[in-house]
Image (tube, grey):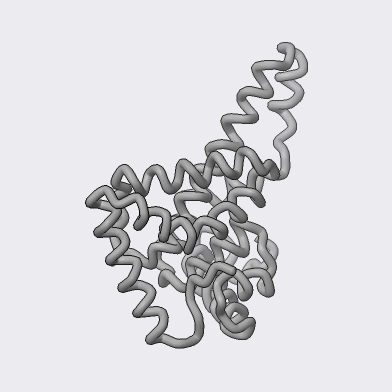
Amino acid sequence: MLTLHNGDGRHVRAEAQEDAVLLREVARGSEPALEAIYNRYGPACYRLARRILADAHLAEDVTQQVFLALWKGSGYDPRRGALSTWLLGITHHKAVDMVRHEERRRAERLGPAQAEIAAAIPGPDDVAWESLRAMQARAALRELSGDHREVLLLAYYGGFTQTEIAEMTGLPLGTVKSRTLHAMRRLRETLAPSLGAEGDETR
């Protein structure tokens, strides 16, 4: 089971220090260090991609792309949050791009009339991902702490239940619930002006 955090702050700091050491080794070209990071965070990235893409092979491709980007020098900045949060964010971005790529390929295989019909009827993935990638939502997410952003990435981008998130991250279920509630309150406060209806729970 992948452990991103647990309730012990000292363990979290120790893990962050381990990540920093591994990242320095990766920058020097150490494949074992990259493998260690993959073993720690790869399963969560794969599960997130799998939820978005609904295809095991495409999810594997996306996960490989994420860690290839890390290998090549990703520009990850530890001051902006935990490595796990950054990796999940990149996974989400690449998975959504893959969804769009596959949709374009499918449209190209259709005849003109079929493609026009398909384009006129957005699928549920299109609606969800476009909403989540809106400029205001992305800006609001960046204002959250790394811990709070992580649970939202898993819950709303990945579609995982709170119990699954607790299992994936090693956090107590109560902590997952409280972080999710806090993060949603912060997002609601930030996005209320752009929604045009303060406290509109439905939107």
Residue at image position (46%, 41%) is: 65
Whether residue 85 is visible, yes or no, is yes
Q: Nearer the viewer, residue 115 or 40?
A: 40
| Position of residue 144 measured from the top left corner of the image (x, y, whole percent) | 43, 69
| Position of residue 89 measured from the top left corner of the image (x, y, whole percent) | 47, 54
Whether residue 136 is visible, yes or no, is no
Q: Nearer the viewer, residue 99 or 166?
A: 166
Q: Nearer the viewer, residue 93 or 126?
A: 93
| Position of residue 75 measured from the top left corner of the image (x, y, whole percent) | 28, 50
Quarter that holds the C terminus: bottom right
Residue at image position (33%, 70%) is: 18
Would residue 168 appear left or right of 150 to someone viewing this image?
right
Q: Nearer the viewer, residue 1 or 164?
A: 1
| Position of residue 26 measured from the top left corner of the image (x, y, whole percent) | 29, 53
Q: Is residue 149 above or below residue 66?
A: below
- Please, which residue is most extreme toward the top here? 112
- Please, which residue is most extreme toward the front here? 32
The quadrant holding residue 140 is: bottom left
